Amino acid sequence: MTAGRDEHTLKTAAIIVAGGSGSRLGGEIPKQYRLLKGTPVLVRTIDAMSRAPSVGLIVVVVPEAEKAGFFDRYCEPYLHEKVGAVRAGGPTRLESVARGLSAVDESCDLVAVHDGVRPLVSVELIERCIMEAERSGAAVPGIPLTDTIKSVDKHRKIISTVPREGLWAVQTPQVFRRDILTAAYDKAFREGFSGTDDASLVERAGFSVTVIEGSTDNLKITYEKDIMRAEAILSAENTKL
């Protein structure tokens, strides 16, 4: 690694949030512990983040009820040495990330927040997000929308067609300077705003966020078909080796 890489390896922390119930996926096992080619989804996510040279610390956030159950059974044996803490999440994503943020050492200048059910994130994408956040203060990966977008009412009747120019589907990891993310969370808690992702909190706090090109392989495991698609991607990658 270069000297620059060595420098921000020590100051970048990753918070992996794995608090979903997996109700849309179905089954008794939460989606973050479902097997993906024989390995739990969350284990693959932690492994991907641990292989990023710029990440020096990983904090994993899981539901409190799972911490001594599913997590210990499925993930504990595989934890990488970069995992510095495992925290019980709160009732909302906002509170879960905040609890993870409280476990980040103050020496870390950058914080990457990543969905625990995005197990196919590449090291290359993680590094690009970190480098852009190091430059601009806040960076998220995304994919430009190519489908036609409709605004629909509660009866599923189309209200209007939304111009897709400039619209992106945003992914994680979302990476921020620690002071920016902390300020955004402080404001969100004070004003009772939850948002849909960390970038929305940062934007609302008055900070600029840069979007970089993400990856279609960086899918979020939500439905059963996502497991099958992820396994197909892994099989294709193995074929290339």
Image (cartoon, rainbow, N blue to C red):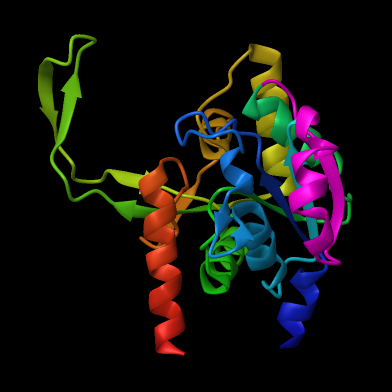
Magenta stretch encompasses residue 75: yes
Please identify the residue farthest to the top as the structure is shown: 155
Residue 229, given in percent of the width and then of the height, sits at 37, 58
Quadrant hosting residue 217: bottom left
For the N terminus, the quadrant is bottom right
Q: Nearer the viewer, residue 37 or 158?
A: 37
- 154, above or below 172, in the image: above
Query: Which region of the structure is painted magenta?
Result: 64-91
Residue 209, given in percent of the width and then of the height, sits at 50, 46
Task: Answer left or right for 54 relative to 118.
Answer: right
Residue 26, given in percent of the width and then of the height, sits at 48, 33
Query: Which residue is found at the position 74% from the left and 25% from the top?
Result: 90
Q: Nearer the viewer, residue 220 or 136?
A: 220
- 131, above or below 211, in the image: below
Task: Answer left or right for 155 relative to 183.
Answer: left
- 207, above or below 219, in the image: above
- 14, above or below 127, in the image: above
Residue 5 in sight from this viewpoint = yes
Q: How many marks?
A: 0
Quadrant hosting residue 98: top right
Q: Nearer the viewer, residue 236 or 59?
A: 236
Residue 137 in sight from this viewpoint = no
Residue 200, given in percent of the width and then of the height, sits at 51, 33
Task: Answer left or right for 28 relative to 154.
Answer: right
Query: Which residue is found at the position 59% from the left and 33% from the top?
Result: 28
